[in-house]
Image (cartoon, rainbow, N blue to C red):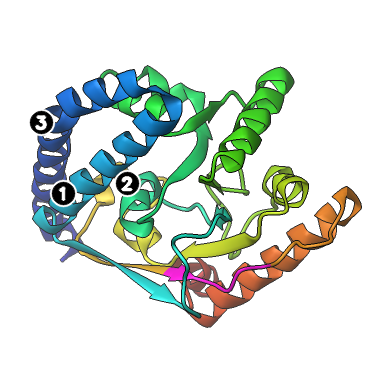
Amino acid sequence: MTQLLKPLRWIYCVYAFVWFVAIMLLLFPFVLIASFFGKIRGGNAIFRICMFWADLWFPLVFIFPRRMYISPHDTTKQYVFVLNHTSLLDAGVLPKAFRQPVRPLGKVELSKIPVFGFIYKNAIVTVNRSSATDRFHSLVTLKSIIGKGISVLFFPEGTYNQTHQPLKSFFDGAFRIAIETQTPVKPILFLDNYSRLPYQDALSFNPGRCRILFLDEVPVSGLTSHDADKLKEKVFQLMENKLRDYKVAWIHESKQA
């Protein structure tokens, strides 16, 4: 049965990719215009354009993102958002997850892709993880963005979680910035992105739900740099426990192995 479905899966992948590119090209002139308004105003405008792209593309490919909240979420408040990372779809879901100004931290390599790379580098803060100098400058940029009233976003695992555990170990950057700027941490979980499009197989793309779960914020008031590891561990445990509660696919697979 799986073999019979493969041609349909490939057709769907081509269909989704064509619409992905077509809508991106349609909106690209507006991105180009917005880029002339600077990193803050222009960046905010480009993220709104990305929201519009997502609002068009996801229904066309029969994927249905849905935001869920443990407690009410204040879109007027600044946060250091931290998210889990298991899917090639994660970046695409971001404009559906956030309806407020936000700047993700993302790897610089993707900025080299024609057209998409231009949008990418103007909508996020890029980082070359192999360069300590570049990592430092990226964190300085993120702190200045927080100072301008915009939330920032991290995938604290640094790269795709290729284990069968809920999460891989976290880097420190998000938690140090949260403490240094006294900005609360807001953990968010992508529960179904792995099931729609796992990191290891671009041709396994399939339609369905994409739940986005906003956990309670973690306050940092009064914490100092010496508390960064404790904050990191606290957020890790909150996210790990909730992923286990929802029995997400990559954990379930390890039990069947």
Residue at horizontal 37 percent and vertical 38 percent from the top: 44
- Which numbered disc flags the more N-terminal residue, 3 or 1? 3
Q: Amino acid at mark 2?
A: Gly
Kindly check if marks 1 and 2 are in contact, taking CB atoms under 8 A apart as contact.
yes
Q: How many numbered badges does the structure rendering display?
A: 3
Q: Position of residue 234 (x, y in %)?
A: 75, 67
Kindly check if marks 3 and 1 are in contact, taking CB atoms under 8 A apart as contact.
no
Q: Can residue 122 be spotted in the picture?
A: yes
Vertical arrangement, residue 114 with respect to residue 42, above or below = above
In screen coordinates, is 127 left or right of 42?
right
Stretch in magenta: 213-218
Q: Quadrant of the N terminus?
A: bottom left
Residue to which mark 2 is pinned? 92
Residue at horizontal 35 percent and vertical 56 percent from the top: 99
The secondary structure type at the circle numbered 1 is helix
- On residue 26, the disc is 3
- Which numbered disc flags the more N-terminal residue, 1 or 2? 1
- Which numbered disc flags the more N-terminal residue, 3 or 2? 3
Residue at horizontal 61 percent and vertical 40 percent from the top: 147
Q: Can residue 110 be spotted in the picture?
A: no
Q: Residues within 10 Å of mark 1 (few under 14, many from 20)?
A: many
Magenta region, main secondary structure: loop
- On residue 223, the disc is none
User: Rounded to the nearest whole Å, what is the CA distance between mark 3 and mark 1?
Assistant: 12 Å
Residue closer to the observer: 183 or 167 = 183
Q: Position of residue 153 (x, y in %)?
A: 53, 47
Q: Residues within 10 Å of mark 2 (few under 14, many from 20)?
A: some
Residue to which mark 1 is pinned? 57
